[in-house]
Amino acid sequence: MAGAIAAFGFPPKALLGADKSSRLKKLDSPQPFDYAWLKGRAQWLRSRPYQKPPARLPDEVTALDWDAYQAITYRNDHALWGDDNRRFRVKFSHLGLYFAVPVRMHELVDGMAQEIAYDPEMFDYGKSGLHAMRLPRDLGFAGFRVNFHSDWRRDVAAFLGASYFRAIGGEPQYGLSARGLAIDAGGAEEFPLFTDFWFEKPAADAATLTVYALMDSPSVTGAYRFDIRPADRLVMDVDAALYPRKDIERFGIAPLTSMFQHGENDRRRANDWRPEIHDSDGLSMWAGTGEWLWRPLANPEQIRFSAFSDEDPRGFGLLQRDREFDHYQDDGAFYERRPSLWVEPRARWGKGTIQLVELPTDDETNDNIVAFWSPAAKPHAGEERLFSYRLHWGANLPVQPPGGRVAATRTGIGGVVGRKRTYVSWRFAVDFEGGDLSLVGEDVLVSPVITSSRGTIEIASARPLHAIRGYRAMFDLRLPDEKPVPVELRLYLTCQGQAMSETWCWQWMPPAAK
């Protein structure tokens, strides 16, 4: 561990006694700390050549499989602030499985920080096969989990692996993840690491936990502050100061990572007995112009990139809109309970693109969806880039489109039933619900406005769908050729010249190209 610490420019630490308020041991004496100091540390680190942290785990830790790693639990009596009568507790995660790089943890009290020492006695190794007496006393931690006083048994947030973290809202169910930063997502991707965390000791009645983090990677260093407020919709305020070591082509701010295997709109991998499998079913965007867009997610045969140009976006997120158990039929994973995650910029972000990367997957344990903001002005070596945003986790988000929202997307062969098909067309059916759609009378005309980057739109219609108190828009797309070229489609509803819904966006690959 001393070698890993030295690699980041920190001197080795001497072990001190346990803190009087807990069973945790500390390293060295307290040192002054604030966010300005952390930004200075990140800038200093940027000026040094990148040093890859060594992952020197004992063989028995490296050999842990999924079940053995899951058998390791943290002892409640070793939780940070566990006997301090606070509303928050922090528990640390063990190294092993996918997590081979030790991360340093610090407690911050009255502006003074002190590193927390790893101790095998913090963990109950259960049936993992590991034994505390045989493990190094300086092994280190992989990450941490946060508990809140409303339910000490369940986490409300967890930071584990690279710069990944997750949280829950009112439904006690993890789902998609966020990250500190994405670099060249979907290509020769680089995964920056959170190397250090600082936990600011909250007041006894505080409802917010503040966590600081130091980031390092070959391309960038960074300083982060997270203010975490658990609730039915958990909120995180994030401040990030980024310091590129070199020019970066694709810089992903506020990246969100999720999983989509199949749903009603994409049956490519629908060989499972469950009707749908996904953590999120669409990308929602609130553009700087005020337009709302909805892009259903897919599990493509080949990697797929989409970019939506914008200036000063008002927000975006990966959502799980479909919350009906019957649509998933999974009484173990409970996909209908998975939280949505909404990004709300807290400052003007200027020009750029909301980018969506969709990767093919055959396994629901693999995250294959990434969405993020990419600034138009590419970051250059020596710069400082500051970003501030708010993350909302849960089923109920802070904002909703004022008009009808896309409830489902379905596709299939086109044409008219009973008539011989002399050419191939493809049918799209998009259901809208909410807004003022339920107030529209039967004798009032609602029309679909449809655009396509290629081909001809045929048999377009919009009619009431009483089952959801909304409308179903349908159309066929006829292509002039069988070129393997994606088609960009857009659709929204109007009534007497007024937009009645958000805009549905879809990138469709003709079947001949599959």
Image (spheres, grey):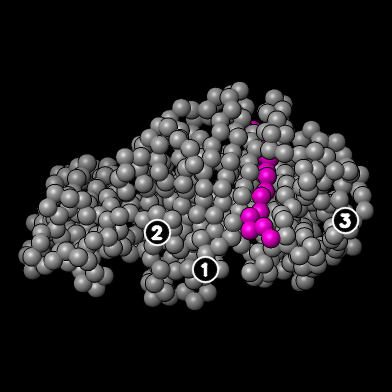
Residue depicted at x 81% and y 47%? 115
Which residue does the numbered mark 3 point to in the structure image? 19
Q: Is residue 302 left or right of residue 113?
A: left
Task: Indicate whether 464 appears above or below 10.
Answer: below
Q: Earlier in the sequence, mark 3 or mark 1?
A: 3
- Element class at badge 2: loop
* Rendered location of residue 86, percent (x, y): 73, 62
Q: Earlier in the sequence, mark 2 or mark 3?
A: 3
Residue ID at (41%, 68%): 323
Q: Amino acid at mark 3?
A: Asp
Q: Position of residue 205 (x, y in %)?
A: 69, 60
| Residue 98: image location, x then y, percent | 66, 54
**Which numbered dot is residue 171?**
1
- Amino acid type indicated by mark 1: Glu
Q: Nearer the viewer, mark 2 or mark 3?
A: 3
Q: Please name the residue shown 22% across and 58% down the image.
A: 428
The stretch of residues the image draws in magenta is 205-220
SS state under label 3: loop
Does the CB distance between marks 2 and 3 fall below 8 Å? no
* Mark 2 to mark 1 CA distance (whole Å): 17 Å
Q: Disc 2 marks which residue?
A: 281
Residue ID at (51%, 35%): 251
Q: Earlier in the sequence, mark 2 or mark 1?
A: 1
* Front position in the image: 84 or 183: 84
In the picture, the quarter occupied by the N terminus is: top right
Residue sitting nearer the eye, 56 or 92: 92
**Taking 131 as reference, is 208 above or below it?**
above
